[in-house]
Amino acid sequence: MGCAVSSGKLNAVQKKILPSILKSKFGSIVESSEEFNTDFFLKYKIKQAEEILEKANELFNGKMVLAFSGGKDSLVVLHLAQKIIPDIKVLYNNSTIEFPETIEYVKILSNTWGFDLEITQPKESFFKLNDIYGWATHEDRWCCGPCKEEPAASYIKQKGFLAEITGTTRTESIYRRSLKPIKLPSKRPYFIRINPIFDWNTQEVWKYIEMNDLPCNPIYEMGYRRCGCWCCPINGPSHYARLEKTHPKFFNMLLNYRYKHPQITQLLEKRRLKAEAKIESALQSS
């Protein structure tokens, strides 16, 4: 009996040959449609983001700071903002558990692009706080407050900025579906947030980066989808399997940490069960 092709491989093949099928069937309609999609993106989505930045600059008289995470979304916003507000102040918060590549990338970009960079960090390191509160979870991300939001908010308040420009999009999660270009505060910290690319999706973000040949965080080249904290609670077991390969020092640190990391425990359990199943299969076939 022949081997069946997995659905994953079948989808990959179909995706690869689909453009050829469409062109042979619809001819110039495909090319015209692609041109329209590109023109629409250039004329409306990018223009929309620029208009949001222009209006915000007018409303807040330039008293804004741009929150830069080192990720793809805030990279696009930074590139757009520098056209509208050349002297925009840029804020990067080092939570103390950032990838070292991200920190280096932010500093290099600041030098090459020439923006005024401020780096903040929490009063206590993440691991000191973790000794007190234990590992954060997807439902209880206690670390975001003291490690990310509070240092940034303290700086914004101290410098008298009226608003913060972000790379947040409403496609990130179901909780952000109602995101607006200018978001008024509903909870602490009471800062107005400007979201120029609130209506963009991931494909459009990467398209803008490609079109403008923007330098990306090297973390993406390592296969990570996000470049935030390397032990963030929303990362699943696959993230830590990759971490073991790219940053074994961090992985071993979590492996030997006094409090067991839930995702590391889950990853090791999956490996144990897989190894046992392999042994059992070998014994049955012998």
Image (cartoon, helix red, strand yellow):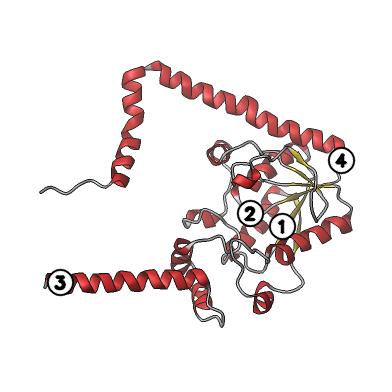
Q: Which residue is mark 4?
A: 60
Residue at x-position 67% and y-position 46%: 167
Residue 49 sits in quarter: top right
Are the residues at dot 2 and dot 1 in contact (C-beta closer than 8 Å)?
Answer: yes
Checking the image for residue 8, the label placed there is none
Classify the position of the C terminus by image quarter: bottom left
Q: Secondary structure at mark 4?
A: helix
Amino acid marked by disc 3: Gln
Whole-number angstrom distance, CA of label 1 to CA of label 4:
21 Å
The earlier-in-sequence mark between 2 and 4 is: 4
Question: In this rendering, would 76 be left or right of 190?
Answer: left
Whole-number angstrom distance, CA of label 3 to CA of label 4:
72 Å
Q: Which residue is mark 1?
A: 92
Image position, residue 152 (x, y; %): 77, 59
Amino acid marked by disc 4: Phe
Q: Which residue is mark 3?
A: 284
Residue 107 or 143: which is nearer the viewer? Answer: 143
Checking the image for residue 70, the label placed there is 2
Location of residue 101 with respect to 133 vertically, above or below: above
Are the residues at dot 2 and dot 4 in contact (C-beta closer than 8 Å)?
Answer: no
The earlier-in-sequence mark between 3 and 4 is: 4
Residue 130 sits in quarter: bottom right
